[in-house]
């Protein structure tokens, strides 16, 4: 089976797409589609060739050499239009300030950075620089193609580092090789299974390659959670029942049930991403959904027979032989039990201090700046990043980010109307360079302008809104318009996604605990965790506090990427609920056994605290390894998730939760009488079916 999964998934990255941030059906999407249909090529240049000359372009020789470069590019069948600074379609802005640099803009026949990939590879491999010119190839589509390659390389490196490191640390935690390898086996199966599932789905729907990064770290992280929980519980039961079927049945009826609820809550959170129409977001949802379900299924299907086969070997060496085995520790003597007692003796001050710390960490989030993928997403050293930097420095700024206006034929048919529109657009506060209007064979007009301010700034976004209020029959597109439409769509869909995640969390936690109060408290705790995460992300990536960004080799924009933030919200909510399930399941067991509330809380924390802490640290370790990725979107994603699991497992789960449960007392388990009875009947039926 493993070999089959490997074979199916081996070529997966080649089947996936590199981006997916366009909002289908938006005005920017319709504008791009209309212009491509009318003109026969993408209105946005997908490739830019920077040609440096030893002599100024005011002379004849470098102009002839540049014309030869353009002729080479035009021969490719996928190229629809090539623009240089000279000739009939020339634009003077394509010459650098020192007159020794010139740009060749290449428009491909098909819209989309993935559609142009094969043509870019052909052109880059065959392009030859004439004498006197030095050529560098960049551009938006080229950058995404390079991004795709970097993501594949980073993914392989992360797997090669994370898996052995995970196994080594597991050996130290479990104090035995056999038990330590179980999470690695489960993690490998869930990741391979997800890759195979994504490859099959990629034949039906376009999926972004970025989903593989999430699948890798989430699969390994959840495998650690579930394997730790099951193996630790089996060891605990084996000390009472002896290693064998009785211990295994007790483990699966308790810890196995918690794994089911945990996998379901993470899957439900990832399902929220499927509501978004952007390829990047729903791809993350597909990857997270498959990974969470496969991690839980692999743990529940694979670990029990392995535990049964390993028998005593799953125990630490010093506990394998009953004659030499040390007596199990008293349930009220562990460090976590004593810590829980301290927290509950000082419940109010601990709750206040913990809440203040978490809220203070989140305060920088009030000043967050949002961004979209642009050339800053590319790692330093890539030619596409170098070309983008040189264009910003030596040419008209933001030349690669034109705003394109698709003008209806009935309006564009009047030359005077087109000229008047161009003149009106040029007077708008955010408008910079305005190109001459063009007319397609079907009568559709095209007017392009360069924003005066940075493309994703408030001024440029305001320019998009002003253009859309002109009143003429136009569709406004381009990269800036795509960001405006993306932001608007996320604001429209996010409330529904959050409501669905909240309802799923409330339902699943109620089914597990039978309480109305504990699920609501869990949602509040998860919200606090999220607030702290975004505050710390703003401090690290936007404000560059303490030089942490330099420490992790981050040289991207001083902002948070919009779509990445959506993924962080969904997955962090899922992981936080995962830890909630692991903790509450042990507290509920003690409570159902008739223990007083305070003792039940302390026993639950004692029995799950070490497992949750180790799981969080191991997941954070995997995420920190993944932070070595060179694409800034991946860095922000994995650092955000690492912060989420560490904050949730330490401050929230270890301090805030037991303190608040102590304050609430018996109210923790409140539910309407009829609902409580129905839950008890359902629990009894499930128990009978398991028996």
Image (spheres, grey):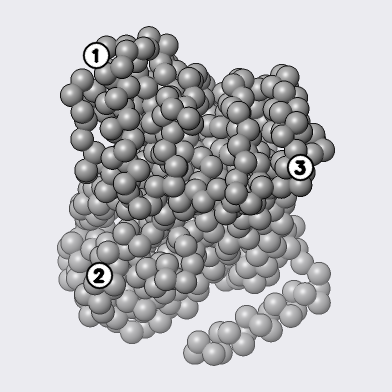
Q: Is residue 195 above or below residue 443?
A: below
Q: Residues within 10 Å of mark 3 (few under 14, many from 20)?
A: some
Q: Is residue 527 above or below residue 387?
A: below
Look at mark 2 in the image and give the residue it sits on.
6
Q: Give the label, 3 or 1, closer to the camera.
A: 3
Residue drawn at x 66%, y 47% as measured from the top left: 443
Q: Position of residue 274 (x, y in %)?
A: 58, 62
- Position of 390 compared to 667: left or right? left
Quarter of the picture containing the N terminus is bottom left
Q: CA distance from mark 3 to mark 1?
A: 45 Å
Q: CA distance from mark 2 to mark 3?
A: 57 Å
Q: Position of residue 653 (x, y in %)?
A: 54, 48
Q: Are marks 2 and 3 in contact (CB under 8 Å)?
A: no
In the foreground, 160 or 485: 485
Residue drawn at x 62%, y 41% as measured from the top left: 439
Let me know if residue 45 appears in the view.
Answer: yes
Look at mark 1 in the image and give the residue it sits on.
54
Badge 1 marks a residue whose secondary structure is loop
Q: Give the label, 1 or 2, closer to the camera.
A: 1
Q: Position of residue 466 (x, y in %)?
A: 76, 31
Q: Quarter of the image holding residue 10?
A: bottom left
Looking at the image, is mark 3 or mark 1 earlier in the sequence? 1
- Position of 209 compared to 592: left or right? left
Q: Is residue 495 above or below residue 91?
A: below
In the foreground, 280 or 602: 280
- Marker disc for residue 411: 3
Residue drawn at x 50%, y 87% as measured from the top left: 690
Q: Are marks 1 and 2 in contact (CB under 8 Å)?
A: no
């Amino acid at each position: 089976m493993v070999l089959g999964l490997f074979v199916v998934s081996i070529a997966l990255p080649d089947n996936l797409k590199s981006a997916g941030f366009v909002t289908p059906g938006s005005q920017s999407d319709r504008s791009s589609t209309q212009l491509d249909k009318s003109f026969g090529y993408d209105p946005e240049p997908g490739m830019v060739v920077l040609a440096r000359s030893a002599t100024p372009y005011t002379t004849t020789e470098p102009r002839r050499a540049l014309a030869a470069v353009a002729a080479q590019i035009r021969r490719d069948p996928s190229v629809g239009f090539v623009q240089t600074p000279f000739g009939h379609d020339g634009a003077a802005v394509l010459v650098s300030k020192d007159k020794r640099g010139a740009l060749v803009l290449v428009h491909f026949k098909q819209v989309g950075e993935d559609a142009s990939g094969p043509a870019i590879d052909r052109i880059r491999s065959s392009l030859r620089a004439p004498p006197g010119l030095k050529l560098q190839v960049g551009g938006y589509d080229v950058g995404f193609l390079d991004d795709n390659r970097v993501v594949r390389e980073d993914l392989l490196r992360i797997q090669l580092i994370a898996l052995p490191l995970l196994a080594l640390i597991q050996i130290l935690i479990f104090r035995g090789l056999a038990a330590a390898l179980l999470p690695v086996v489960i993690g490998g199966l869930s990741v391979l299974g997800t890759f195979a599932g994504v490859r099959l789905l990629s034949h039906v729907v376009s999926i972004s390659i970025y989903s593989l990064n999430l699948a890798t770290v989430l699969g390994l992280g959840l495998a650690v959670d579930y394997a730790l929980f099951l193996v630790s519980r089996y060891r605990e039961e084996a000390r009472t029942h002896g290693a064998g079927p009785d211990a295994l049945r007790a483990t699966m009826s308790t810890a196995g049930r918690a794994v089911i609820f945990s996998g379901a809550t993470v899957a439900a959170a990832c399902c929220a991403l499927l509501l978004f129409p952007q390829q990047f977001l729903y791809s993350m949802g597909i990857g997270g959904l498959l990974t969470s379900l496969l991690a839980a299924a692999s743990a529940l299907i694979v670990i029990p027979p392995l535990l049964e086969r390993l028998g005593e070997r799953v125990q630490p060496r010093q506990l394998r032989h009953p004659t030499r085995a040390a007596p199990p520790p008293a349930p009220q003597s562990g460090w976590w039990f004593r810590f829980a007692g301290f927290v509950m003796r000082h419940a109010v001050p601990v709750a206040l201090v913990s809440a203040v710390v978490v809220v203070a960490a989140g305060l920088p989030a009030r000043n967050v700046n949002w961004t979209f993928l642009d050339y800053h997403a590319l790692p330093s050293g890539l030619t596409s990043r170098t070309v983008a930097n040189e264009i910003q420095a030596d040419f008209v700024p933001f030349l690669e980010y034109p705003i394109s206006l698709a003008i209806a034929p009935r309006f564009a048919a009047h030359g005077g109307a087109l000229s008047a529109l161009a003149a009106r657009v040029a007077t708008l506060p955010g408008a910079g360079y305005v190109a001459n209007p063009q007319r397609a064979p079907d009568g559709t007009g095209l007017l392009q302008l360069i924003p005066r301010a940075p493309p994703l700034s408030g001024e440029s976004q305001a320019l998009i809104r002003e253009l859309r209020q002109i009143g003429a029959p136009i569709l406004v597109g381009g990269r800036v318009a795509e960001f405006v439409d993306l932001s608007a769509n996320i604001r429209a869909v996010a409330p529904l996604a959050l409501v669905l995640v909240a309802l799923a969390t409330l339902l699943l936690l109620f089914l597990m605990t039978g309480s109305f109060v504990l699920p609501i408290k869990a949602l509040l705790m998860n919200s606090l965790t999220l607030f702290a995460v975004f505050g710390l992300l703003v401090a690290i990536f936007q404000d560059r506090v303490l030089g942490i960004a330099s420490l992790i080799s981050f040289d991207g924009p001083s902002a948070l990427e919009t779509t990445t933030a959506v993924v962080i919200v969904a997955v962090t909510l899922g992981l936080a609920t995962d830890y909630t399930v692991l903790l509450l399941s042990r507290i509920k067991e003690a409570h159902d056994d008739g223990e007083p509330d305070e003792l039940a809380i302390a026993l639950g924390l004692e029995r799950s605290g070490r497992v949750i802490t180790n799981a969080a640290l191991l997941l954070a370790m995997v995420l920190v390894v993944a932070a070595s990725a060179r694409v800034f979107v991946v860095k922000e994603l994995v650092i955000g998730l690492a912060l989420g699991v560490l904050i949730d497992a330490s401050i929230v789960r270890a301090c805030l939760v037991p303190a608040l449960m102590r304050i609430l007392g018996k109210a923790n388990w409140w539910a309407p009488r009829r609902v409580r009875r129905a839950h008890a009947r359902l629990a009894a039926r499930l128990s009978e079916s398991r028996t």
